Image (spheres, rainbow, N blue to C red):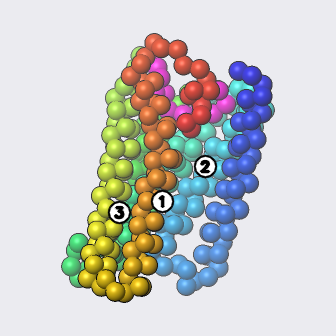
């Protein structure tokens, strides 16, 4: 690998740290300082900020450091820790988007009559994100798959490109693709699709209302942005991981395996 690639990787990680830390730290700080912001519907946004901070400290910082050396220099324990925290943060973020979609669907579309979204429901949503994230990040630590240096060998992730004996990588990759990509995408697509339909129905009932039409445009834009953001964040990594997994024995360059992540 060209040394310039390691420099570019380190610079990109530094940019992500500069962009990610202040925004997410301020989100937590401002919410803690101002009680009126601590509403149940904001809990999942705080959870998303925590997930991003996990990525900053558990993933970006470590990758920036190792890229300066040209390989992962922190050993097996460091690889497990970096892989765990980066995966945990990413998965909490993923499932936070799922819970956010479900919460908006329930609040706006009211599929459950006389349902009032409260603090207990918000806490359950946050708990779900952590349970699902742990169900993805913990197994490689206990023998179902494993964390190994990936791509340019400066960061660690789930082993999706070998079929090492005793780790059952094949079943874990299939589990990941179904439970931690296909299902979240389906739920997000369904919830925001129903939300969009509900707003369009309301707009059709009040065609002359400028406020309703403006709300419809805002919701439509929000739905498109959320779905595209999910696909941009996860589709490249999931697609490349699945392609490599299904083409065992083929040659893949380190840059090919690094870019999607």
Mark 3 surroundings: few (<14), some (14-19) or many (≥20) residues within 10 A: many
* Residue drawn 68% across the image and 38% down it: 63
Pointer 3 residue: 192
Q: Position of residue 217 (x, y in %)?
A: 43, 72
What is the chief secondary structure element of the magenta stretch? loop
Examine the image and state in which quarter residue 22 appears. Answer: bottom right
**Residue 181 vertical placement versus 208 (above, below):** above
* Residue drawn 39% across the image and 57% down it: 98
The magenta-colored residue range is 152-164
The answer for how far apart the CA atoms under marks 3 and 1 are is 11 Å
Helix, strand or loop for disc 2: helix
Front position in the image: 29 or 225? 225
**Residue 176 vertical placement versus 71 (above, below):** below
Q: Position of residue 88 (x, y in %)?
A: 51, 47
Q: How many marks?
A: 3
- Classify residue 10 as left or right of residue 33: right
Q: Is residue 22 magenta?
A: no
Question: Is tag 3's residue or tag 2's residue first in the polypeptide sequence?
Answer: 2
Helix, strand or loop for disc 1: helix
User: For residue 69, which numbered disc appears in the image?
Assistant: none
Q: Position of residue 97 (x, y in %)?
A: 44, 58
User: For residue 55, which numbered disc appears in the image?
Assistant: 2
The answer for how far apart the CA atoms under marks 3 and 2 are is 26 Å
Pointer 1 residue: 225
Examine the image and state in which quarter residue 139 appears. Answer: top left
Question: Is tag 3's residue or tag 1's residue first in the polypeptide sequence?
Answer: 3
């Amino acid at each position: 690998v060209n040394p310039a690639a390691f420099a570019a990787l380190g610079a990109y990680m530094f940019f992500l740290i500069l962009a990610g830390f202040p925004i997410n730290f301020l989100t937590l700080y401002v919410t803690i300082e101002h009680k009126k912001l601590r509403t149940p519907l904001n809990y999942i946004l705080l959870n998303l900020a925590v997930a991003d901070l996990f990525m900053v400290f558990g993933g970006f910082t470590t990758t920036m450091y190792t890229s300066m050396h040209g390989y992962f220099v922190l050993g097996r324990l460091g690889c497990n820790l970096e892989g765990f925290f980066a995966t945990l943060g990413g998965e909490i973020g993923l499932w936070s988007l799922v819970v956010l979609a479900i919460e908006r669907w329930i609040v706006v579309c009211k599929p459950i009559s006389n349902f009032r979204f409260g603090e207990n429901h918000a806490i359950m949503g946050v708990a779900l994100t952590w349970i699902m994230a742990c169900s993805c990040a913990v197994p490689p630590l206990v023998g179902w798959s494993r964390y190994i240096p990936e791509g340019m060998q400066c960061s660690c992730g789930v082993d999706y490109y070998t079929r090492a004996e005793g780790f059952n990588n094949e079943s874990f990759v299939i589990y990941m693709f179904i439970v931690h990509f296909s299902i979240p995408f389906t739920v997000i697509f369904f919830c925001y699709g129903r939300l969009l339909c509900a707003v369009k129905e309301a707009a059709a009932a009040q065609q002359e209302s400028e406020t309703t039409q403006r709300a419809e445009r805002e919701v439509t834009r929000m739905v498109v942005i959320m779905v595209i953001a999910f696909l941009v964040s996860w589709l490249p990594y999931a697609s490349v991981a699945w392609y490599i997994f299904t083409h065992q024995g083929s040659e893949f360059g380190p840059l090919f395996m690094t870019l999607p992540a």
